[in-house]
């Protein structure tokens, strides 16, 4: 791990170099994680069957909800940590570490207990049929039993990234992915554990890497580490962390609600295969979104530190560069999927009818996807500088205020196609709103757009 002087470079090093230094490890880690999700789906689709793949899609709302509570603590605390480092408040930074541990233990355990009590009726409400419910239940039951480890793993990784150790965060993710890639085929194809084998692979890999993270934070030479007196919850840290983390929490919570509506509408108008098509689409969308989120994770500590240090020119510069790179990524991804939608969908399953359902969805969703990177970066920018209100507006507008009415109206006229159309229209409107909010923010600071 780096020594205590590592964070100081955030306020002095060239922005372009810093962004690459922080973003590349995050991009590699996020891409590796996304590729794991894709290969996980491929193993399930080919090794267990297309109905298991549909069952996996049914669990997406609960996984998003779990991620929402994890990001509430992890993302909020990591942003607060960057700001405190910019203010040279290292005592508070160390208490943030202890508070993250305690908060994740509390939230992770409470979430698991509550969801396990109502798991089967929840999955039925999410759109599970008699054919797909057993797969969804087996997979989610195991994930919920290990949910507290998942929360701790992601929470500590966010602190590594924000405290000047993006390479460590990257390696933690890569280790998790590599362990997963070994255990998944072993449990599915050799041990014949079915979809439960995939869930066990996920939890076991996170527990193993979490042990490594605990060991690293035991290094007394690092400026934040385990020590007495940092585990008592502090009102200001908890309040500020949860306030800043409210935007990613609402985004993930809204995603949970949205996926429920999408699955139910798809099942209503297209049955299990339409739900399976969304599972495929979701995995492909997530691949490119995760790359942009990796960029955002590189931007976040730079923007947060320099905002805390009142170096606003540096904040604006990292924003501009991040928007440029995110747009390039999304344009490339959109072009690839629009050109080869059938080949992309066929990676996940041999069921030709399922591929047929997925192709038009891919075409519709990726029609304006090249613009979405801008919206994601702007939302994270507001979060990074400690302005959660604007970030929450952007998150809710895309996921709730715009998309939900469209999902409730358009499928009545266009059936399954109406679901895909709703996503495309929502993305386009949310990009316009992000541009308006960013313009207003920069104009109030007398900065050129």
Image (spheres, helix red, strand yellow):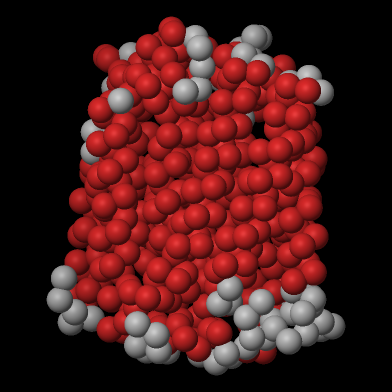
Question: In front here: 231 or 85?
Answer: 85
Q: Position of residue 445 (x, y in %)?
A: 23, 81
Q: Position of residue 355 (x, y in %)?
A: 42, 14
Q: Is residue 117 above or below residue 154?
A: above
Residue drawn 25% across the image and 36% down it? 335
Q: Is residue 217 above or below residue 406?
A: below
| 31 left or right, relative to 200 | left
| 287 left or right, relative to 57 | left
Find residue 166 and report its image quarter.
bottom right
Find residue 402 and report its image quarter.
top left
Question: In front here: 133 or 24?
Answer: 24
Residue drawn 41% across the image and 76% down it? 18
Camera sees residue 361: no
Q: Is residue 280 above or below residue 391?
A: above
Q: Quadrant of the C terminus?
A: bottom left
Residue drawn 61% across the image and 53% down it? 174
Question: In front here: 183 or 91?
Answer: 183
Q: Position of residue 200 (x, y in %)?
A: 77, 35
User: Total of numbered circles in the picture?
Assistant: 0
| 103 left or right, relative to 267 | right
Q: Quadrant of the N terminus?
A: bottom right
Residue drawn 75% across the image and 58% down it? 210
Q: Position of residue 176 (x, y in %)?
A: 67, 49
Find the residue positioned furthest to the left.
448
Camera sees residue 324: yes
């Amino acid at each position: 791990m780096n020594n205590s002087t590592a964070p100081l470079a955030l306020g002095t090093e060239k922005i372009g170099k810093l962004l690459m230094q922080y973003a590349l490890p995050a991009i590699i880690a996020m891409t590796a994680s996304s590729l794991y999700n894709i290969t996980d789906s491929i193993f399930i689709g080919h090794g267990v069957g297309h109905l298991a793949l549909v069952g996996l899609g049914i669990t997406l709302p609960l996984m998003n909800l779990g991620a929402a509570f994890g990001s509430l603590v992890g993302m909020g605390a990591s942003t607060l940590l960057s700001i405190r480092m910019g203010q040279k408040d290292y005592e508070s930074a160390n208490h943030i570490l202890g508070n993250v541990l305690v908060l994740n233990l509390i939230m992770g355990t409470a979430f698991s207990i509550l969801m396990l009590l109502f798991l089967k009726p929840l999955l039925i409400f999410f759109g599970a049929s008699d054919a797909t419910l057993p797969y969804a239940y087996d997979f989610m039951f195991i994930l919920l039993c290990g949910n507290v480890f998942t929360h701790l793993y992601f929470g500590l990784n966010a602190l590594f990234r924000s405290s000047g150790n993006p390479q460590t965060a990257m390696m933690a993710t890569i280790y998790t992915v590599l362990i997963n890639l070994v255990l998944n085929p072993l449990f599915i194809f050799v041990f014949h554990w079915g979809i439960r084998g995939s869930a066990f692979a996920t939890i076991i890999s996170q527990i193993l890497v979490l042990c490594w993270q605990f060991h690293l934070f035991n290094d007394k030479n690092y400026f934040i580490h385990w020590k007495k007196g940092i585990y008592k919850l502090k009102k200001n840290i908890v309040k500020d962390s949860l306030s800043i983390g409210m935007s990613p929490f609402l985004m993930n919570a809204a995603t949970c609600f949205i996926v429920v509506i999408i699955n139910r509408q798809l099942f209503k108008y297209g049955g299990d295969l339409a739900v399976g098509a969304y599972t495929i689409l979701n995995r492909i969308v997530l691949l490119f979104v995760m790359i942009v989120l990796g960029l955002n994770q590189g931007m976040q500590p730079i923007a947060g530190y320099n905002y805390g240090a009142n170096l606003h020119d540096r904040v604006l510069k990292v924003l501009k560069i991040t928007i440029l790179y995110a747009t390039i990524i999304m344009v490339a991804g959109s072009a690839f999927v629009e050109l080869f939608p059938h080949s992309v969908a066929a990676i996940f399953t041999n069921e030709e009818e399922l591929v047929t359902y997925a192709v038009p969805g891919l075409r519709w969703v990726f029609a304006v996807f090249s613009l979405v990177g801008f919206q994601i970066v702007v939302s994270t920018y507001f979060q990074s500088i400690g302005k959660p209100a604007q970030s929450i507006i952007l998150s809710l507008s895309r996921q709730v205020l715009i998309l939900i009415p469209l999902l409730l109206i358009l499928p009545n006229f266009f059936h399954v196609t109406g679901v895909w159309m709703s996503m495309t229209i929502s993305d386009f409107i949310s990009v316009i709103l992000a541009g308006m909010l960013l313009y207003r923010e920069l104009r109030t600071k007398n900065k050129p757009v």
